[in-house]
Image (cartoon, coloured by chain):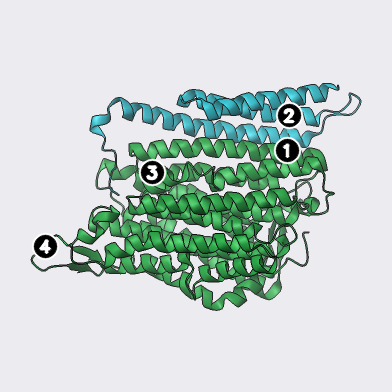
Amino acid sequence: MTPALIYGLTGIVVFGIGLFGALCVRDRLRRLLALNLCGMGAAFVLVAGAWRMPPDSADPVPHALVITGIVVLVSATAVALALIRRLHTLESAPEEIPEDTPE
Amino acid sequence: MTEPLQFWMVALLFLPLIGAIAAFVLPRHAPIVGMGVALGVTGAAVGLCWQVQSVGTGTVALGGWGAPLGINLHVDGLSAAMLAMTAGVGAVVSMGAVNTFGGRVARSAETARPRQYFWPLWLLLLTGLNGVYLGTDIFNLYVMIEVIALAAVGLTVLSGSLAALRAGLDYMFASILGALLLLMGVGFVYLQLGRLDFGGLAGADPSGALVAALALMFVGLALKTALFPLHFWLPAAHANATAPASALLSALVVKAALYIIVRLLQHMPAPGEALVVLMGLMGTGAILWGSVQALRADRLKLLVAWSTVTQIGLIFVALAQAGVAGLAHSWKAAAVLILAHGVAKGAMFLAAGRIRAEVGHDRIRDLDRSPVRPALAQLAFAFAAVSLIGLPPSLGFIGKWMVMEGALAAGNWHWVVITMTGTLFSLAYFSRVFAGFLRFDRVEADVPGGVVEQRGRAPMDYAPLALAALGVALGLVAAPILEFLEIGRAGGWP
């Protein structure tokens, strides 16, 4: 078993744990964290796949993919957190907000 | 930048991007900026189609860096058709939105926020969509589809109501998960092939790992395009958004992921019969389940949203109609259905929004009680339904015809049965709405003049009507459209 394989399999397991959480957890914040865990798992797999035996340097392209993926995930997480916060505010004072506002 | 073709391609990408920033920085002038950019993009798309028709395909290597390291933009018949559909529907929706979100002075704090943010979000969405249709490597498509997703979630929650926020959050979760699956698949493709551009994919040897990567990407994209059983987020999100936002989400946003699936099927090594049959089965599920839900829907916009689910299912059936061997041709039927649905559904959501605004509610069972009949909006809804049901001579009819023809030629008669069943169902659920439009004996008759026919005012009633009529009329020029879609398919990728 090469180190790359061990890291890759770990990444897949982390991805699986995150996927399980994203599908089965009801709490919104936990669900978001599970999705972030998923993202970490995917990043793990890609970085492990970029690894080469020491005299060779690692393939930089998967690293670039991972960094872009992190940027995308951070912005998506920020939007989701803003939505969760807004929902939390609205739900704590439900009688003031009409369920179905006309356009 | 010497060729006009390349000029139009770059303009299509950067005009909406600059417009989005301008609309955000200058909120008071956002409607003018937004409308101007929407019209400018339409002009650029027409110019691009003209060039593609006369010159053929075109490529731009941004910054002078070509594939495999740099980012290439490429346009062929299918891309140009998608760009034109996006620009046209977008311009009409913008006209509808000028009425909803236009004006310089906000009337109240309630309407100020949607008014301020609609235009930047819509132009950002347009940037992402154009980027997907011009992109040539799967990682760029991933980034662009994320730009689309963030803008689309923003548009979903624009009304700020609790229902819209809940639907928007579900949409966001589905979208993140879909993006991660797509990213994982893209990464696997790179680890396998060392390339990400379509040109590199086309020459690859088929292997088990590549099929696994394709399957991962397919699931991620199916989640984003809301293919049954991954459609759970769509009806609430599309039904609770404001009317122009619903039109954009339903007509354009889901098409981006569909387009990527079509492209992957064109360029990846043959995915195996199982995956193709699975696509057809999921499409069948979407048609049946979506139809049943549309028959049960109590709100007009919810019915229209479920009809989107069935139409997406139909597009997957179109892709699967002739098995792996038929993929070389069946993408054309899918592309025609994508274009037909984009045009018709944009018109239908705008019309539904107008009907709701005039009648005061959109409960289907009470439509025939209303003394107010917004005649033009109802006509637009009916025209859009003609294309979605697939009555001749609409573009939807041409698409369904091609599906059935291809399926019969390949001996897959079961897809014909599914298509027919879907058609019958769509006739049934749209008839629920038409009955409400056309029955006058249950009108609550406390209005002195009897039924009040609203003629509607330009441009907000004429815009959806024109779009819906276009969806019907495009079927008459189906042969040139099909030839146009073929441009560039013989040559391969740069």
Query: In this rendering, is residue B472 above or below A34?
Result: below
Give the amino acid at mark 1. Answer: Gly
Between disc 1 and disc 3, whose residue precedes? 3
Residue at image coords 72%, 67%: B488
Q: Tell me the tag on residue B458.
A: none
Q: Tell me the tag on residue B445.
A: 4
Q: Residues within 10 Å of mark 4 (few under 14, many from 20)?
A: few
Residue B241: percent from left, percent from top? 38, 47
Q: Tell me the chain of label 4.
A: B
Residue at image coords 75%, 48%: B70
- The chain coloured green is B
Mark 4 vs 2: CB contact within 8 A: no
Image side of residue B13 versus residue B122, left or right: right
Give the amino acid at mark 3. Answer: Leu
Q: Tell me the chain of label 3.
A: B
Residue A4: percent from left, percent from top? 81, 25
Q: Residue furthest right?
A: A55
Q: Nearer the viewer, mark 1 or mark 4?
A: 4
Which secondary structure lies at badge 2?
helix
Which secondary structure lies at badge 4?
loop
Residue at image coords 57%, 43%: B223
Between disc 1 and disc 4, whose residue precedes? 1
Does residue B61 appear in this view? no
Image side of residue B458 versus residue B131, left or right: left
Observer-nearest of B408 and A50: B408
Q: Colour of chain A?
A: cyan
Q: Nearer the viewer, mark 4 or mark 3?
A: 4
**Residue holding disc 2:** A45
Which secondary structure lies at badge 3?
loop
